[in-house]
Amino acid sequence: MNTPDFSAAARFVAANARVLDRRRFERLFEDGPAAPVRDAVAAYRNDDGGFGHALEPDCRAPGSQPAAVAMAMSIMDETGAWDEDLVRGACDWLAAVAPAEGGAAFVEATLAAWDHAPWWVPEEGHPASLVATGMIAGTLHARGVSHPWLDGATEVMWNRIAKLDAGQGGTAPLGGYEMFGILGFLQHVPDRERAREVFGRVGPLILERNMVALDPEAPGEVHGVLSFAPEPDSLARVLFDDATIQAHLDHLAHGQKDDGGWTFNWPAWSPAAELDWRGFLTVDALRALRANGRL
């Protein structure tokens, strides 16, 4: 069994990660308190209730963005630092800027004058994004939140997934990132019978459309098995045999760099964003390894 060098990872986080990810590390692996995580997340909050300021490292703009909201909620959820006031404010902001159909766009145009990754481009017509809508809605459902924005977002997700299921996806792409949003939603939406039934039809698209790299050594900007099924109870685990899961866990453990941290396989467009991502992903890698009995 391959295990990472935990001490080296701890040193990498201490030396290189944002305060936010240092607090995540302390909370998740050193029995640290929840309040400092909540406070670190709150530092990225805007007066409108949303989150920005490079909380999502690929957007350096101060203005609120759905992806930053998704990250804020995910971090508060994973660390048990859930804050109802922050969440309510973020949901109110999402409702104020929602596309006409509901849900959340992937990118809001407020980033225009600021540095951001080249793939952060507002979509024409301001449609709802499967990525942002699904990931945010999934976390809110996991926490049992009630809010009008979530009601609309849930309908958006069911409607969009039904169109995919019926082969009516239109011109919108369906790739790995969109599937992450779908899986995040289906993992936690309260109607479990419907979620399992829908996953049984939509989940196999991960394999049929070659969204996943089954070879853990596959080069380039690919999505590995653990991107779709990071934990033993992930819905998508049924798509992969145990030998494949174990091979990808081996690859993840071996992915630790000489400096103790992990990195990513998409383009590094900014030194600051690269370092922010490495701190975040180092904590994520340790979480995934521990959840699968490798730490």
Image (cartoon, rainbow, N blue to C red):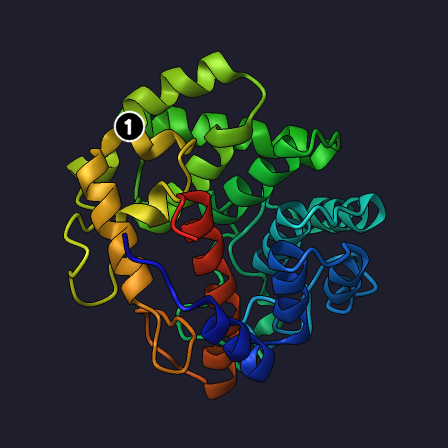
Residue under the point 20% across and 33% down: 241
Residue under the point 85% across and 47% down: 85
- Element type at mark 1: helix
Residue 168 appears in the picture as rendered = no
Horizontal and vertical percent position of residue 114: 58, 81
Residue under the point 77% across and 56% down: 33
Q: In this image, 5 relative to 150: left or right? A: left
Horizontal and vertical percent position of residue 40: 74, 66
The total number of labels drawn is: 1
**Viewer-closest of 17 and 55:** 17
Q: Is residue 266 above or below residue 93?
A: below
Horizontal and vertical percent position of residue 52: 67, 67
**Residue marked by disc 1:** 238
Horizontal and vertical percent position of residue 120: 46, 67
Q: How packed is label 1: few (under 14 Cα within 10 Å), some, or many (20 or more)?
A: some
Q: Is residue 9 above or below residue 95?
A: below
Direction top: furthest residue: 193
Q: In this image, 177 relative to 38: left or right? A: left
Residue 271 appears in the picture as rendered = yes
Direction bottom: furthest residue: 271
Tell me the kind of residue under disc 1.
Val
**Viewer-closest of 264 and 251:** 251
Residue under the point 57% across and 77% down: 17
